[in-house]
Image (cartoon, rainbow, N blue to C red):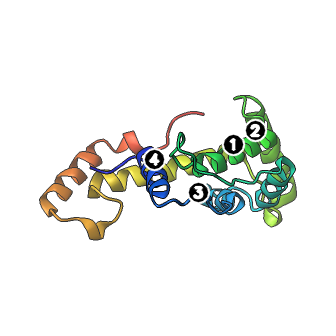
Amino acid sequence: EIPTTDLLREETGRLAYFLDIRDYPVFPVKELISRYILQLELPAEMHGFAARLVNQQKLEVKYHLHATRKSVPNFEAIAMAYVVILLKLFFGLDDHTERLLSEYAKELSQLIGESHPLFIWDEWVRHIGMKLSELQMKTFIFGQSDIRDVRNVDVFLENYRILSKQKGRFSDNRKR
């Protein structure tokens, strides 16, 4: 059974407490935020804004273990929260503002041409949705995310047949 991240953080904290490791080093939240920005394929300019936002908040994720609190903080959630805050600051994220900004960006993009590509929210959402669908498809077909991990060719072929019949389920033909 694969442990959850909550269980891993709790076990890490308990082990650190048992080993009498009381102070953790400062966690590099900025690096984790940058990694998420890269993985989400957001504009590179967001790295600088993220760093400024973290500096403005004077965030120093230093954790001290106590007898009553034996779990390590969820650093990934803290970093992703900063990414969401940045997206909220830039695009509004109210199901209206980001769409309006996308329309403006599309119009402006047509005017200035491809020499200066602009970030268009709707296109990014579609792109990330397609990447997620591809990952789900690979996981569904292979049982893992990598073909080298396929152990049973019959199961692989059966999953592929099922997938090809349901192909519309994985495509991104929905209206947004």
Q: Are marks 1 and 3 in contact (CB under 8 Å)?
A: no
- Give the mark nearest the N terminus, 3 or 2: 3
Residue 162 in view of the camera: yes
User: Closer to us: mark 3 or mark 4?
Assistant: 3
Disc 1/disc 4 C-alpha distance (Å): 25 Å
**Residue 28, percent across and down?**
68, 62
Say few, some or many: other residues with alpha carbon within 10 Å of mark 2 (under 14 / 14 to 19 / 20 or more). some
User: Closer to us: mark 1 or mark 3?
Assistant: 3
Q: Residue at x 24, y 53 (%)?
A: 160
- Give the mark nearest the N terminus, 1 or 4: 4
Give the SS element for disc 2: helix
Amino acid marked by disc 4:
Glu
Q: Residue at x 67, y 43 (%)?
A: 81
Q: Nearer the viewer, residue 115 or 81?
A: 81
Residue 8: assigned label? none
Disc 1/disc 2 C-alpha distance (Å): 6 Å
Q: Nearer the viewer, residue 124 or 4?
A: 4
Q: Are marks 3 and 2 in contact (CB under 8 Å)?
A: no
User: Closer to us: mark 1 or mark 4?
Assistant: 4
Give the SS element for disc 3: loop
Q: Residue at x 30, y 67 (%)?
A: 147
**Residue beneath label 3, please?**
22
Q: Nearer the viewer, residue 70 or 157?
A: 70
**Residue beneath label 1, please?**
84
Q: Residue at x 56, y 50 (%)?
A: 128
- Give the mark nearest the N terminus, 2 or 4: 4
Q: Residue furthest left?
A: 154
Quadrant where the C terminus sits is top right
**Residue beneath label 4, please?**
10
Q: Are marks 3 and 4 in contact (CB under 8 Å)?
A: no
Image check: 176 left or right of 7?
right
